[in-house]
Image: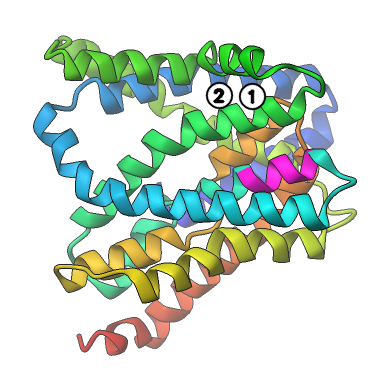
Amino acid sequence: MTIPVILGLIASGFILKRFLRREWIFNFIGILANDILLSFFVLASLAGKSLEYLAGLSPVFFYVAAVVAICLAGSYLYGRQFIRDDRGWRGALMVLSIFPNTAALGFPLVAVFTRDLAPAVLYSAASSLLAIPLATFLTIRYSRDGRGLGETVTATLSFPPVTVSLVSLGLVLGGVKLPEKFLELAGKIGWWSLPLMLVYFGSRLQFKNIPLRKILETGLFRMILPFFFLLFALRPGSEPVFYAILIESAMPPAIMAASILARHQLKAEESTAVTLVLTLVAILLIFSLKISGLGGALVGR
């Protein structure tokens, strides 16, 4: 899916919401995309993998876990100190901070610096494997005041994409292989979660009040903090690995993260506005590097 198509789908959701004005339609799209179709997408993406593939994720998974840990800890401590009166945004900030847009934006930007996208693909897979359950847990935890930890865990595990990801992981670890035709069908069905999620994301957009402070807060913990952390801490075995991990870790929040927040009615308007602005910044950076040729110059290509 190209960047113009992504922007077009977001715009279509925004326009349709203004004309239809029936909230139940977009709530249905949100449930269809986030609960049902995303489950098929996760099943096809994970259950079809092998133990060797998962073993290949282990070196990259270390960096993913380190980035998630530092972004989560940083945003949590910041929220406890400076966002005391807005519990909902504290939770939303953590979700946006740990869930980068590694595929739709990460891959094109990595391609500016290196032709080897294999490390980026591995990083994206490891990131999704960790981010989807954790983001779901945090969203449910902060969207339901007064709920106990056990109830939050139960609700998280019962969220279809999380359930499917755990079952799929168990199948792979157990050496159980599902029929290829079934996985292909699941992949074709699940693919539709992506455009519908973008339409749903667009339907949540509100331009009445762009929260500048929240944009800066999210940019700090989702993009700036992991970038400089890995810039000084990363010791890659090769140049492609270095650029892939560094760039993927500093991508803006995933639209899927904002979609999950909107699905559970946790700071939907602020989250979508923040995600859109930071996404546009990343897109502008990609186009600028491609047009100017600076990306290739920086790595001596």
Mark on residue 34? 2
* 19 versus 176 height, above or below: below
Let me know if residue 173 appears in the view: yes
Which residue type carries mark 1? Gly
Let me know if residue 275 appears in the view: no
Q: Dot 2 lies on which element?
A: helix
Residue 126 vs residue 80, the one in the foreground: 80
Residue at image position (83%, 22%) is: 22
Which residue type carries mark 2? Asn
Magenta highlight on residue 162: no
Compared across the picture, whether 152 is left or right of 37 comes to right
Q: Which residue is mark 1?
A: 30
- Most frequent secondary structure within the magenta stretch: helix
* 123 versus 229 height, above or below: above
Task: Say if mark 2 contacts mark 1, CB within 8 Å.
Answer: yes
Compared across the picture, whether 251 is left or right of 55 comes to right
Q: Which of the 4 image quarters holds residue 166? A: top left
**Counting other residues with Cα less than 10 Å from the Cα at mark 1, is it few (<14), some (14-19), or many (20 or more)?**
many
* 172 versus 105 height, above or below: above
Q: Which of the 4 image quarters holds residue 116? A: bottom left
Q: Residue 21 in the image: x percent, y percent?
A: 85, 27
Q: Residue 290 in the image: x percent, y percent?
A: 38, 77
Residue 268 vs residue 3, the one in the foreground: 268
Start-end of magenta stretch: 88-94
